[in-house]
Amino acid sequence: MASNPSFDVSTGADLQEVDNAVNQALKEIAQRYDFKGTHCTIEFDRPSAEIRLAADDEFRMDALVDVLQTRMIKRGVPVKNLDVGELIAATGQSVRRTVKLTQGIPQDTAKRIIKAIRDGGFKKAQATIQGDEIRVASPSRDDLQSIIAFLKGQDFGIELKFGNYRG
């Protein structure tokens, strides 16, 4: 007996693309006139999937975040997965901020996605949480296509990826 067709829902950014975007942002900051003579830094901590920003003041921090997000968009990194932290005052006028990358669907978001699939009227579809992914299975391939379209139309605060489609 063959198993039901299924697909996986996941999220996450390609860390190499994030690294490239950070390097491009650093180059842009080094060349831009409004950043000349300032102490603005961007550090990418790959193992913890965090980007640490430091700037002279709030205005430059906003510009730094904008440059970083622009570079991320151009590299194809989903900016919905960026969790921009609060401003933390450092010495004098300088400020710091940590940007966390969402790598994997958080448990509460996974439960909301499964509830949305159940409430969406897909009767025979079964969604299960598997680690930081969700596997959706259904006897009907058409249902799976409908579920993908349905989830793309929803906003769960993260960028969803659909893959590992088994027919």
Image (spheres, grey):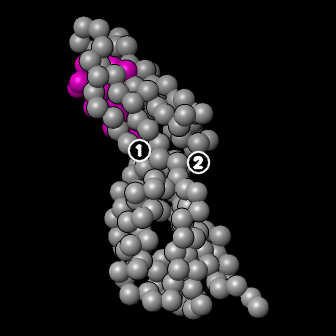
The magenta stretch is: 54-70
Tag 2: Cα neighbours inside 10 Å, few (<14), some, or many (≥20)? few
From the top left corner, tell me how far across and down residue 117 is, in percent. Answer: 42, 77
Task: Answer with the quarter of the image where residue 119 lies.
Answer: bottom left
Relative placement, left or right, of 60 versus 153 is left
Q: CA distance from mark 2 to mark 1?
A: 13 Å
Which label was assigned to residue 82? 1
Give the answer, above or below, for where 85 lies relative to 165.
above
Q: Secondary structure at mark 1?
A: strand
Q: Residue at 35% of width from left, 11% of height from top? A: 37
> Visible in this render: residue 15?
yes
Query: Which of marks 1 and 2 precedes in the sequence?
Result: 2
Task: Answer with the quarter of the image where residue 18 lies.
Answer: top right
From the top left corner, tell me how far across and down residue 132 is, in percent. Answer: 55, 56
Q: Residue at 44% of width from left, 71% of height from top? A: 114
Q: Secondary structure at mark 2?
A: loop
Q: Residue at 40% of width from left, 35% of height from top? A: 99
**Residue highlighted by disc 2:** 14
Amino acid tagged 1: Leu
Quick check: is 140 in the magenta stretch?
no
The quarter of the rendered structure image containing the N terminus is bottom right
Task: Answer with the quarter of the image where residue 19 lies.
Answer: top right
Give the answer, above or below, for where 85 lies relative to 152.
above
Between residue 120 and residue 36, name the one nearer to us: 120
Amino acid tagged 2: Asp
From the top left corner, tell me how far across and down residue 26 is, in percent. Answer: 47, 27
Between residue 46 and residue 21, name the one nearer to us: 46
> Visible in this render: residue 73?
no
Between residue 19 and residue 4, name the one nearer to us: 4
Give the answer, above or below, for where 10 lies relative to 26.
below
Give the answer, above or below, for where 53 lies relative to 121.
above
